[in-house]
């Protein structure tokens, strides 16, 4: 049995994934890119561009609800958010256009590299030299994966 052409088991899995991403969005300010995109690609076989577009569409209402909740506690700097939103709206159009042009593997590698660099930069332990070395090794691995290990 299917709903909207999606098997029931997959519909439930997408519901759980949405819940995890929504909770992560509210708790940590992440969700679509960090949780949904890898899950849609790895677990559900989505191509990178479709995963990114789907995650962005899902995160609009989730982000609005999270922002509303934070705003209720005066934890949103509205002037800064408004200025950043203008830049984000304009740049998102160009970023999405570029993502649709790039080959899937290049986009996946760039996405993975960004996630690794962000994770390394956020790690609380270790000297900046150690973290820089780790980031460099991971970046080299990504470049090798992209251009050598096809």
Image: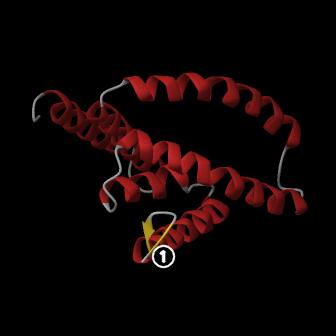
Q: Residue at x 83, y 34 (%)?
A: 82
**How is the model colour-coded?**
secondary structure
- Which quadrant does the N terminus fall into? bottom left
- Does any portion of residue 40 appear in the rendered image? yes
Classify 138 as above or below 143: below
Image position, residue 87 (x, y; %): 70, 25
Disc 1 secondary structure class: helix
Q: Dot 1: few (<14), some (14–19), or many (≥20) neighbours within 10 Å? A: few
Q: Report the label total.
A: 1
Image position, residue 46 (x, y; %): 35, 51
Task: Name the side, left or right, on which 138 lies relative to 19.
Answer: left
Residue 18 lies in what quarter of the image? Answer: bottom right
Q: 79 or 44, which is in the foreground?
A: 44
Residue 141 lies in what quarter of the image? Answer: top left
Image position, residue 102 (x, y; %): 35, 25
Q: 67 or 43, which is in the foreground?
A: 43
Classify 9 as above or below 35: below
Q: Residue at x 38, y 52 (%)?
A: 126
Residue that numbered label 1 is attached to = 12
- Does any portion of residue 118 appear in the rendered image? no
Q: Residue at x 52, y 64 (%)?
A: 4
Image position, residue 40 (x, y; %): 40, 56
Q: Residue at x 30, y 57 (%)?
A: 42
């Amino acid at each position: 049995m299917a709903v909207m052409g999606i098997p029931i088991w997959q519909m439930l899995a997408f519901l759980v994934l949405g819940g995890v991403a929504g909770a992560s969005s509210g708790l940590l300010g992440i969700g679509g890119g960090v949780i949904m995109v890898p899950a849609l690609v790895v677990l559900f076989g989505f191509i990178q561009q479709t995963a990114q577009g789907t995650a962005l569409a899902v995160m609009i209402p989730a982000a609005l609800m999270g922002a509303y909740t934070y705003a209720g506690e005066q934890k949103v700097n509205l002037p800064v958010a408004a200025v950043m939103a203008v830049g984000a709206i304009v740049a998102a159009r160009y970023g999405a256009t570029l993502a649709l042009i790039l080959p899937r593997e290049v986009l996946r590698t760039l996405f993975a590299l960004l996630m690794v660099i962000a994770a390394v930069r956020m790690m609380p332990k270790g000297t900046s030299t150690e973290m820089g070395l780790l980031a460099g090794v991971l970046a080299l691995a990504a470049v090798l994966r992209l251009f050598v290990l096809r």
